[in-house]
Amino acid sequence: MRLFQVDSFTSVPFKGNPAGVCILDKFLDTSFMQSIAMEMDLSETAFVVIKENEYRIRYFTPTQEVPLCGHATLASAHILYELGLVPQNKKFVFKAQESDLLISREANWIKMNFPIYKLTKANFSLKFNEIIGINPIEIYKSDNNWIVAMVGTEREVVDACPDFEGIRRGNLGEIIAVTSISDSSEYDFVVRVFCNPKIGITEDPVTGAANCILAPFWNQKLNKTRFHSKQLSKRTGELLLELKDNRVDIMGQAKTVFKIEMNNK
């Protein structure tokens, strides 16, 4: 069994978001896949099964299975193209738990078509501000239990200092995206993504799936359908986005860092 580690949403190694990728003939026992993800200790490890021209994908954090993950989808597509398991010019569909994901290539970028989620304006107490370490202008909640908090400046995004145990105790949803307009003309917006520690992650380095809510959010604010975004984690990463027909095309680059031959005896 071979495992790959891929840095997603970057063109250089040791940036972006690392994901594990395991290509299989059939899915292993769920508890065994969970153990592999725990051993990899990355925000997500993806397991891909190719059978009769069908591409199925499942995602695991170190502590639980999750229904959808952007950077692990990108990493998996990158490996399939790099190994020649899918021809470079071929489109294909990953069948994930939450959605079918159309995958294609554009030059050196991989394009992934994801669903979008509705946002509802929310009211949170001052305790929320203290826990996340920000003073938001607006807060929204998505129908997949994520939170978007908009702040006034990029510096506030950089300086956010969450109390992760407070996030856990306060049951503040699974994902909290803190975002603002970018200071740079190169990017439309910037973001950091904080997670409830119960899912096995604290801050996610680059979060493709967050753009299922960030793209429609910034569409409302900027009246645009195309975006260039940057995630301001320590590793950083960048994405190209386009809203189309109630879905979002998420484009990124990826770099294989190493591969592992697993002893499964």
Image (spheres, rainbow, N blue to C red):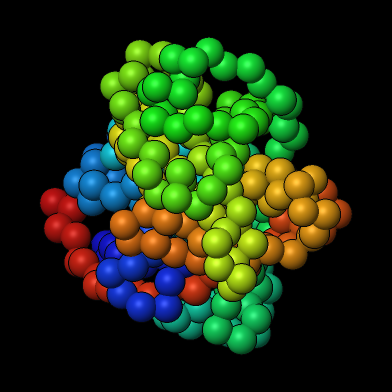
Residue occupying the point 57% across, 16% down: 124
Residue 3 is left or right of residue 89, and the answer is: left
Name the quadrant of the N terminus: bottom left
Spot occupied by residue 172 in the image (x, y as percentages of width and height): 48, 20
Residue at horizontal 47%, vertical 57%? 231
| Image coords of residue 27 (percent x, y) | 42, 48
Q: Quadrant of residue 117?
A: top right
> From what the image shows, is residue 152 above or below residue 235?
above
Q: What residue is drawn where x is 48% and y is 82%? A: 84
Quarter occupied by residue 17 = bottom left
**Closer to us: 39 or 12:** 12
Residue 248 lies, in percent from the top left, at 72, 56
- Percent position of residue 189, x then y: 60, 57
Q: Is residue 125 visible?
A: yes
Residue nearest the observer in this picture, 253 or 84: 253
Q: Is residue 82 left or right of residue 70?
A: left
| Number of marks present in the image shown | 0
**Looking at the image, residue 124 lies above or below residue 82:** above
- Toward the viewer: 145 or 69? 145
Residue nearest the observer in this picture, 61 or 191: 191
| Above or below 127: residue 2 | below
In the image, taking residue 221 as reference, residue 35 lies left or right, namely left
**Identity of the residue furthest to the right in this view:** 245
Q: Residue at x 59, y 73 (%)?
A: 186
Residue 28 seen from this side: no
- On the rendered structure, is 141 left or right of 132? right
